[in-house]
Image (cartoon, grey):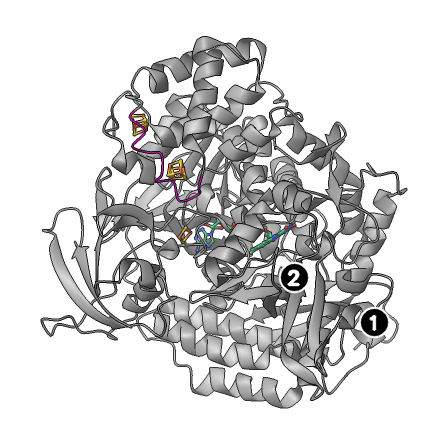
């Protein structure tokens, strides 16, 4: 299977971005974008369509099985994980365009600095000073909320999130939901307050983030549950 | 404030950081990527502790005995005792920080795992590592907000500072800005296994490059049991890597078979009527290799799970099923899954005492990079335990004895103009290692590999790290050559039996630039080699 990759590249944050096109012969359509990028990381193996030697393309990866969030990028216009994107899906038209996520500062090529994700979790005080109770009622919700990869795909599509703004977005609310469903007493009040301020008040509830999460976290259900717990107090757990 | 540097922010690094911060010691937590991307998040099946929730009479003593036996009797019994007896406490602490373990009848659930007759493995569906990491990250975040932990989450190891056999700190490079930072104070290494030596061939991550270990080895740090590499019997091949099919699949009732004369032969059940498909991993992987060499058998082993009740797919292994469907297009609830053994874990690594001290003062190691608990073969569910427990022991030891206070903030230093390790170098070296260090080894293959590393795999003149990696790779081969016996994961065709002379750790170290290999026997020193 032959695919032309158009990659938006940049040597460092100061230099100008440019588009480089590389023709790639995949051994099988079951390959993922990550497999191609691993190949593009090999020194001197590829020449671009303009005849220049391709300098190793910089991108981040770790698990190569959609479990760590490292390889999130914009693939044919959609935020996705490179290791979760098969060539048979996105390469049907023979072309795949890769760009870095747009809501974070670019470091180089497809690498962005997602520090804001972790800063936000600190701002929201996503931790507990007390024992966290999980029981048969809340274990499933706590499990679901523990699965966030901090990849940032959900923020890419969110009309209300911008780095540095007061709205922390889905990537913060999912880990926070673990505490919301498991805490009680004063600690729970603290988390509720933070949820109201940093999530509820900023979220437009458009649910553009609904079908984006590569971990398949049921964001809509977690949002409804969190709203019930933090705003309406309809359910205890 | 005192400062301790931790390299690696997986289970071991986070666990160590939490212990130190609790004592109001500042931690510089250095990792190639944020914790969310560490290999620990991949752990699926569970974590062991003899809690005896199902009333089978399980005890820490039995946990200890199983661990030592599966490890070929070469792990330090005192260290393993500590591990097994503290395991219930470790799990209790994880429950208290809110890890959503599966529950049954109002208490934590436990499943069967390889090499153990009792239900001893606590789990959260098949994403146990991810949910434990998530809870530990939250714990460390609080210390970070309080100023006791500073994270350096896109920083890679450059060089250990060693003076007269004492560790004084470490230099790392910020991969985003290119700046090098020098940290002073003691160092706890929690850098994971050597998956990076085998690109594309392991179940692990690409960020565990083994560069930290190579850098320490070059400075004279002693390693042990480098020849002990665990091949997990059930992995599936994707275009990028080997993905694990957790032992939990067999713990919940999955059966291995191969076609023989047109019918399914459940070879493990016939050969091992007691533990059946749940024999320790070294045994299962060897057996798979053997049946595949048997001309009467088909050339693919399958894992049959279609008979598992819906309850298992919904409550206990939903993520595993999703993953197999996603990458192979096979639904394990309906059809058998083609599986094969692949590299999964490194029992060998940095040599430490039971308190996690290395041979270098001020340098400690814990987690998968350290060889302490698992001997010649690791039991499933014991490595998360070893990482969480070992990290905390290393931190306690370091807190109790570190003389050098270190400085809370690092100095910006000139970067060495050192080239990056080339992927062509890694791939070539991997080609040699994988041939020589398969499930079954022999003198010829190992000697050939040694020669190839010396003569054919030429490190780049502009990259010191390539040279250090080659030296550690050579030590792996030499260790495998040295251990002239078969034990645990190390099977020598030419020495098929266990030899009491090798009942202990095979150690490897560079002494004045020369590789020295020897054996440190576990009990007494009759028949020294
Ligand atoms: C697919 C899979 C499933 C598993 N399932 C289980 C299971 O069910 N039960 C069980 O007990 N064990 C399991 N294991 C094993 C277990 O997960 C690991 O052994 C354990 O998590 C290791 O933890 P660690 O903290 O030592 O290392 P890791 O989690 O690997 O962390 C290593 C850290 O070191 C950092 N690092 C590496 N190199 C550098 C460098 N050069 N510079 C700076 N930082 C660096 C990384 O960024 C990372 O933060 C599994 C392993 C895999 C791969
Ligand atoms: S519902 Fe809309 S505003 Fe709220 S997090 Fe999702 S995308 Fe953003
Ligand atoms: S919620 Fe989903 S999309 Fe958003 S950061 Fe977490 S894993 Fe990524
Ligand atoms: S590399 Fe981990 S999610 Fe893609």
* Nearer to the camera, B176 or B341: B341
* Residue matched to label 1: B270
Q: Is residue B76 above or below residue B231?
A: above
**Image: A235 above or below B477:** above
On screen, residue A64 above or below A130: below
User: Hey, which residue is sitting farthest right in the picture?
Assistant: B57
Stretch in magenta: A206-216
Expressed as whole percent of the image width and height from the top left, the position of residue B410 reads 37, 40
- Name the residue rendered at 62%, 74% in the picture: B516
Residue B386 appears at what percent x and percent y? 67, 48
For this rendering, which residue is in front, B142 or B256? B256
In front of the other: label 1 or label 2? 1
* SS type, badge 2: loop
Q: Chain of mark 2?
A: B
Residue B426 location, quadrant: bottom left
Q: Residue B310 at what x, y percent from top left?
A: 66, 46
Q: Which residue is mark 2?
A: B347
Res B390 → quadrant: top right
- Which image quadrant: the C terminus of chain B? bottom right
Q: Chain letter of disc 1?
A: B
Magenta span: chief secondary structure: loop
Residue B135, visible in the rendered structure: yes
């Amino acid at each position: 299977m032959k695919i032309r990759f158009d990659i938006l590249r940049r040597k460092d944050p100061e230099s100008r971005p440019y588009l480089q096109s590389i023709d790639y012969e995949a051994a099988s359509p079951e390959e993922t974008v990550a497999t191609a990028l691993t190949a593009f990381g090999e020194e001197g193996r590829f020449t671009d369509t303009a005849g220049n030697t391709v300098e190793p393309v910089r991108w981040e990866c770790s698990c190569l099985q959609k479990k760590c969030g490292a390889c999130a990028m914009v693939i044919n216009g959609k935020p996705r994980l490179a290791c979760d994107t098969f060539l048979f899906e996105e390469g049907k038209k023979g072309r795949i365009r890769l760009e870095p996520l747009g809501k974070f500062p670019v470091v180089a090529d497809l690498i962005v600095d997602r520090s804001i994700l972790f800063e936000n979790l600190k701002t929201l005080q996503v931790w507990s000073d007390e024992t966290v109770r999980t029981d048969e009622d809340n274990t499933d919700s706590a499990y679901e909320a523990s699965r966030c990869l901090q990849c940032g795909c959900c923020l890419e599509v969110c009309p209300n999130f911008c780095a540095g703004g007061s709205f922390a977005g889905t990537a913060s609310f999912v880990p926070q939901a673990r505490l919301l469903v498991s805490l009680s007493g004063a600690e729970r009040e603290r988390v509720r307050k933070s949820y109201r301020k940093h999530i509820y008040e900023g979220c437009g509830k458009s649910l553009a983030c609904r079908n984006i999460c590569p971990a398949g976290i049921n964001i809509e259900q977690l949002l409804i549950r969190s709203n019930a717990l933090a705003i309406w107090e309809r359910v205890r757990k | 404030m005192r400062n301790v540097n931790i390299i690696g922010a997986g289970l071991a690094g986070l666990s160590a950081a939490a212990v130190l911060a609790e004592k109001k010691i500042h931690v510089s937590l250095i990792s190639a990527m944020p914790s969310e991307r560490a290999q620990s998040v991949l752990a699926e099946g569970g974590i062991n502790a003899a809690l005896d929730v199902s009333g089978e009479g399980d005890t820490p003593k039995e946990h200890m005995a199983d661990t030592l036996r599966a490890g070929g009797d070469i792990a330090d019994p005192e260290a393993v005792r500590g591990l097994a007896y503290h395991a219930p406490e470790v799990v209790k602490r994880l429950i208290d920080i809110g890890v959503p373990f599966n529950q049954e009848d109002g208490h934590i659930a436990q499943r069967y795992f390889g090499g153990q007759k009792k239900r001893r493995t606590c789990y959260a569906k098949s994403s146990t590592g991810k949910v434990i990491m998530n809870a530990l990250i939250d714990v460390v975040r609080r210390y970070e907000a309080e100023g006791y932990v500073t994270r350096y989450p896109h920083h890679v190891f450059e060089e250990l500072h060693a003076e007269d056999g004492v560790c004084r700190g470490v230099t790392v490079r910020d991969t985003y800005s290119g700046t090098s930072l020098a940290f002073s104070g003691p160092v706890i290494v929690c850098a994971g296994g050597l998956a990076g030596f085998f690109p594309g061939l392991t179940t692990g991550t690409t960020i565990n490059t083994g560069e930290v270990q190579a850098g320490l080895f070059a400075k004279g740090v002693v390693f042990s049991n480098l020849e002990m590499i665990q091949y997990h019997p059930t992995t599936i091949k994707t275009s990028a890597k080997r993905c694990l099919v957790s032992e939990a699949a067999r713990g919940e009732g999955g059966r291995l078979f191969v076609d023989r004369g047109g019918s399914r032969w459940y070879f493990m059940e016939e050969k091992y009527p007691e533990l059946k498909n749940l024999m320790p991993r070294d045994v299962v992987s060897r057996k798979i290799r053997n049946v595949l060499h048997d001309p009467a058998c088909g050339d693919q082993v399958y894992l049959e799970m279609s008979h598992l009740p819906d309850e298992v797919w919904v409550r206990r292994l939903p993520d595993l099923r999703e993953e197999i469907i996603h990458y192979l297009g096979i639904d394990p609830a309906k059809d058998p899954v083609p599986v094969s053994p692949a590299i999964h874990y490194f029992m060998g690594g940095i040599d430490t005492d039971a308190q996690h001290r290395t041979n270098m003062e001020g340098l400690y190691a814990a987690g998968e990079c350290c060889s302490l608990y698992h001997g010649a073969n690791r039991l499933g569910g014991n490595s998360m335990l070893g990482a969480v427990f070992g990290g905390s022991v290393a931190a306690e030891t370091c807190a109790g004895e570190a003389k050098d206070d270190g400085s809370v903030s690092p100095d910006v230093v000139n970067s060495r103009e050192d080239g990056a390790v080339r992927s062509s170098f890694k791939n070539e070296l991997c080609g040699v290692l994988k041939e020589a260090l398969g499930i079954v080894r022999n003198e010829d293959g190992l000697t050939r590999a040694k020669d190839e590393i010396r003569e054919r795999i030429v490190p780049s003149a502009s990259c010191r790290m390539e040279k250090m990696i080659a030296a550690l790779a050579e030590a792996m081969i030499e260790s495998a050559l040295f251990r002239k016996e078969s034990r645990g994961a190390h099977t020598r065709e030419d020495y098929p039996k266990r030899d009491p002379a090798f009942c202990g750790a095979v150690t490897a170290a560079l002494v004045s630039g020369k590789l020295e290999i020897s054996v440190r026997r576990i009990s007494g020193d009759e028949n020294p080699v």
